[in-house]
Every structure is written in structure tokens, then in C-alpha cells.
Amino acid sequence: MLLLKSLHKAVLLMGLLGLLSACTPTVQVALPNEPININLNVKIQHEILIKVDKQLDAMFSESSGLF
């Protein structure tokens, strides 16, 4: 009788575990068919101040008594 109750509980537990495992969602990772395109519309502006730098160097190198 005791063996029958424990067997009944074991079967019931296995049935519940089977039902719970059947409801678990699956996650799939798939590669896309087309390549991934990333469009970056970036406008880069820069200024080169070589002319001003040369003028400043000339001004400080002269002995004009600026300082």
C-alpha cells in the first residue's frame, strides 16, 4: 500500500514535470539573409589655422617690444 502511494506520487510528479517542460519557450538565433547596412550621415568640419599660427610666430619672434 505504501509502495503504491509513493509510486502514484512519483507518476504524478513526472506528469507535472512533463507538462511544465512542454510549456517552456524556445529561443532561436538565426542569421539574417541580407547583410546589415549601417548608414551614418556624418558631416565633419575642421579648420586648419596654419596661416594664423605662422603670423603669431612671426609676431612673437620679432623684437618689436610687444612685451
Image: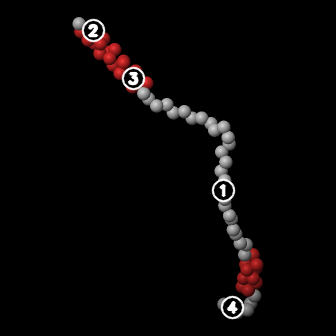
Q: Nearer the viewer, mark 3 or mark 1?
A: 3
| Mark closer to the chain start, 3 or 2 | 2
Residue at the disc numbered 1: 40
| Mark closer to the chain start, 2 or 4 | 2
> What element does badge 4 sit on?
loop
Residue 58, x across and y down, in percent: 76, 84
Residue 56 horizontal side relative to residue 7, left or right:
right
Disc 3 to disc 4: CB gap under 8 Å = no
Distance of label 3 from label 4 (alpha carbons): 91 Å
| Mark closer to the chain start, 4 or 1 | 1
- Look at 73% across and 80% down and name the residue there: 52
> What element does badge 3 sit on?
helix
Image mark for residue 4: 2
Residue 22 horizontal side relative to residue 5, left or right:
right
Distance of label 3 from label 2 (alpha carbons): 22 Å
Distance of label 3 from label 1 (alpha carbons): 49 Å
Q: Nearer the viewer, mark 2 or mark 4?
A: 2
- Look at 39% across and 23% down and name the residue there: 19
Distance of label 1 from label 2 (alpha carbons): 70 Å
| Mark closer to the chain start, 3 or 1 | 3
> What element does badge 2 sit on?
helix
**Residue 59 in the image: above or below residue 47:** below
- Look at 23% across and 7% down and name the residue there: 1
On the question of residue 57 being in view, the answer is no
**Residue 56 in the image: above or below residue 38:** below
Image mark for residue 19: 3
Toward the bottom, the furthest residue is 65
Q: Amino acid at mark 2?
A: Leu
Q: Residue 9, located in which quarter of the rendered image?
A: top left
